[in-house]
Image (cartoon, rainbow, N blue to C red):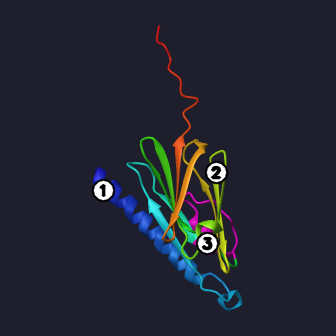
């Protein structure tokens, strides 16, 4: 019975992805006016029995009615194009004592990258000539901003944070 529910969930996800792709092709984006290639994609991760997390990347945002029910914020209207700005592919991995944010941004150098953090939001910007990247990453946990170590090599930015466990306290049981 459990396998049947998982299969139904998986089939529902695949149908939703198919609808997203169909909607992308049916959207009214004027590619000739943009003068650059349109890039759109998604990454999907799932941990254990948690619902899957779907993230967009590229220079086209299609967060409209075709994404309803998938946990992506609703933007309404037609497909949204951000001229010249690309959303990089982002992966977040939680290790035992650190949080790793891995961002794919080819065609730039480490000097082009700007990072800032406020609370649990990491803002990433990079610019090198006509290559521009921008992403706002919601971190799943609180981290120590001062512990951040960032490296950029072969088009991949990795930012490592230590967890903020300052509010963790032991409770004595009487």
Main secondary structure found in the magenta portion: loop
Residue pointed to by mark 2: 121
Q: Which mark is residue 62?
A: 3
Tag 1 or tag 3, which sits nearer the N-term? 1
* Stretch in magenta: 58-82
Tag in front: 3 or 1: 3
Tag in front: 2 or 1: 2
Q: Residue 129: x percent and y percent?
A: 68, 79
Left or right of 20: which side holds 130? right
Tag in front: 2 or 3: 2
Q: CA distance from mark 3 to mark 1?
A: 31 Å
Q: Is residue 70 visible?
A: no
Q: Residue 157: x percent and y percent?
A: 53, 63
**Mark 2 residue crowding within 10 angstroms, few (<14) / some (14–19) / many (20+):** some
Residue pointed to by mark 1: 4
Q: Residue 138: x percent and y percent?
A: 60, 52
What residue lies at 64% left-to-right and 51% top-to-bottom?
121
- Does the magenta-highlighted stretch encompass residue 16? no
């Amino acid at each position: 019975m459990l396998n049947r529910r998982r299969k139904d969930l998986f089939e529902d996800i695949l149908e939703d992805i198919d609808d997203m792709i169909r909607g992308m092709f049916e959207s009214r984006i004027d590619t000739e006016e943009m003068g650059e290639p349109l890039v759109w994609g998604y990454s999907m991760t799932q941990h254990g029995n948690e619902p899957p997390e779907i993230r967009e990347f590229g220079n086209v945002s299609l967060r409209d009615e075709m994404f309803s029910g998938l946990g992506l914020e609703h933007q309404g209207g037609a497909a949204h194009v951000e001229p010249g700005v690309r959303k990089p592919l982002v992966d977040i991995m939680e290790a035992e004592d650190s949080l790793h944010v891995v961002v794919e941004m080819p065609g730039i150098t480490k000097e082009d990258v700007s990072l800032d953090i406020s609370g649990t939001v990491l803002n990433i910007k990079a610019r090198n000539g006509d290559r521009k990247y921008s992403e706002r990453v919601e971190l799943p946990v609180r981290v120590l901003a001062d512990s951040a170590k960032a490296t950029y090599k072969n088009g991949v930015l990795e930012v490592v944070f230590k967890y903020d466990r300052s509010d963790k306290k032991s409770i004595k049981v009487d």
